Image (cartoon, coloured by chain):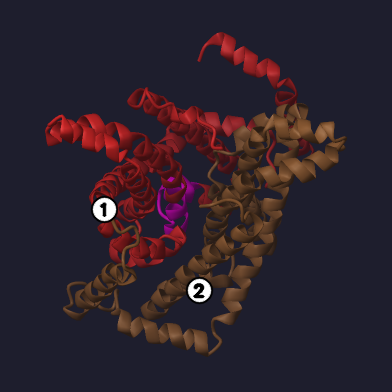
Chain colours: A red, B brown
Amino acid sequence: MTEAGGSKVLRGRISGWLLILMLLLLWEISGILSQAQSWPPFHSVIAATAKGLASGELLGVLLGTLGRMAAGFCIGGVLGVVAGLILGMDRRLAAAFTPLLEGLRPLPIPAIVPPLILFLGIDDALKIAVVAIAVFFPVLVNTLGGVQSIDWVLLQTARTFGKSRTVTMSRVVAPAVLPSILAGLRIALSLAFVTTIVAEMIAGSGGIGYFIIETQYAMRPDQMYAAVICLAAAGYALNWLFIRLEGRAIRWHRLSDTVPS
Amino acid sequence: MRSSAAPLWLGLVPIGALIVLWEAISGFRIVNPTLLPPLTQVLPVVSHIVLSGEILEPLSQTLAIMAAGYLIGCGIGCGLGLLMGWNRAIYDLFDPLVEIIRPIPKAALLPPLFLFLGMGLATKLVIVALAAFFPVLINTIQAVRGVSPVAIGTGRTLGFSSVKILFRIVLPFSLPMILAGMRISLALALILVVLAEMLVDSRGIGYVILDMQRSFKIRDMYAWIIILGVLGMLLNAAFEVVEKRLVPWRTR
């Protein structure tokens, strides 16, 4: 955010930015020279991006996708946290459900879209459901892991001091579990983003996933690349936003800085 | 005091409950049984598909593309990751590009690939390789950077060449984390190959599932989904076996 930080990054990786610049230049020149309809020069992609955003067409499509994603993310996230907390309360309960969860998890998400279409059609309900299902599992698994890793001594200490259930929950359990939940939500967020787009591509109705397919079939590659650029920007923004929120929620636990050993 | 290992049968209870629930939902027509046929009607279809050999063509198609794309993506990711983690100049050169491309959902790159590589084999291979590439790359870079300087210094003291240090010290040290990246990549590769099959051409398990749904052969659709789920489980299990062989010193 700070000016100094930004310029430091820029200076340190000057060769990297030059590489990107050269690739873009190559794109521009080859696009102008090739004349092929499928390979528009970079400037026309930028123009299409600006036009699509200004006219609201691209922006509307993108916002629709993000809205469905948010709905599915919230539903799946809440259900995942609740299920994880419930399973985490009892070791035998967790052990009982582990085989079922491990059995359902390896099924790749695109495969659940066709059967869900039978029940929910191809519109918003379908995409929200698919995203919620995709989000549910990593959030559940992380929440469960967090609950199970709570220091037993801490719980006993709270009990020894005669703390009430509410105090124990808010002062001992929540701080211990929150980092794991947020780690799960962060994995789930990028998963939700991909899943929304995948569902839109398969179901073939609305959203930026469908827009990309549609513009490819209609041979409007400048608009297609514009949509891909918007997706990259949205993905970047989502990740940035989540890291900021996460930093606020768990100041004592700088999760994003820890390097796995 | 607490029994750490819950009895094995306990895990069968929720699975059994789910199967009974499934049977009941379609048996009592809570949901239209045409859309959700009971499991007892789906399983015979599964066994028919497996026993008649119908399974072979789509399964081999999916597995071959997935294996090839996965290995290409992991190989390049690991190689570039070693170089980027090892050499600061190479890292500076590629890092901004990686950071720009990484947040794009790989599924969104399918349509641009259609334009260049057509709707066939090449597109499917490239998209699977792309999906597998990034987690392996990121994990490899971090792993190489986390290798203890003492270990590298020891190698230097013993007069190892840089290449020898890279392959005899850095690579073994990094292996557990590289494999962790490859595990993420495995799941992504399966997702992308199924998606590509649904969008691209008339082959593979992904295509069959969508085709059965469109031609309203609902039992076959569920049967193929079960087959795909089992395939995912077997791939995970196989990965774990390989992981234990390669890094036996790492206790999970």
The answer to whether residue A24 is seen in the rendering is no
The answer to whether residue A111 is seen in the rendering is yes
Return the residue nearer the eye: A143 or B227. A143
Return the residue nearer the eye: B198 or B148. B148
- Residue B39 pos. (x, y %): 31, 79
Q: What stretch is highlighted in magenta?
A: A196-211
Return the residue nearer the eye: A116 or A174. A174
Instruction: Based on the picture, tell me whether residue B102 belongs to the magenta stretch.
Output: no
Q: Residue furthest front?
A: B1
Task: Mark 2 and mark 1 in contact? Answer it, CB < 8 Å.
Answer: no
Q: Distance between the residues labelled 2 and 1?
A: 36 Å
Q: Say what amino acid the circle numbered 2 marks.
A: Val
- Residue B1 pos. (x, y %): 28, 54
Is B5 rendered above or below residue B37? above
Is A181 rendered above or below residue B116? above
Return the residue nearer the eye: A13 or A195. A13
Instruction: Based on the picture, tell me whether residue A200 belongs to the magenta stretch.
Output: yes
Label 2 chain ID: B
Left or right: residue B88 versus residue A82 is right
Tag of residue B250: none
- Residue A215 pos. (x, y %): 54, 48
Is B94 rendered above or below residue A92? above
Which element carries disc 1, helix, strand or loop?
Answer: helix
Which callout, 2 or 1, points to the residue nearer the camera?
1
Residue topped by disc 1: A87
**Image quadrant of residue A232?**
top right
**Image quadrant of residue A242?**
top left
For label 1, count other residues whose C-alpha is less than 10 Å away and answer few (under 14), some (14-19) or many (20+): many
Label 1 chain ID: A
Residue topped by disc 2: B208
Q: Residue furthest bottom?
A: B52
For label 2, count other residues whose C-alpha is less than 10 Å away and answer few (under 14), some (14-19) or many (20+): many
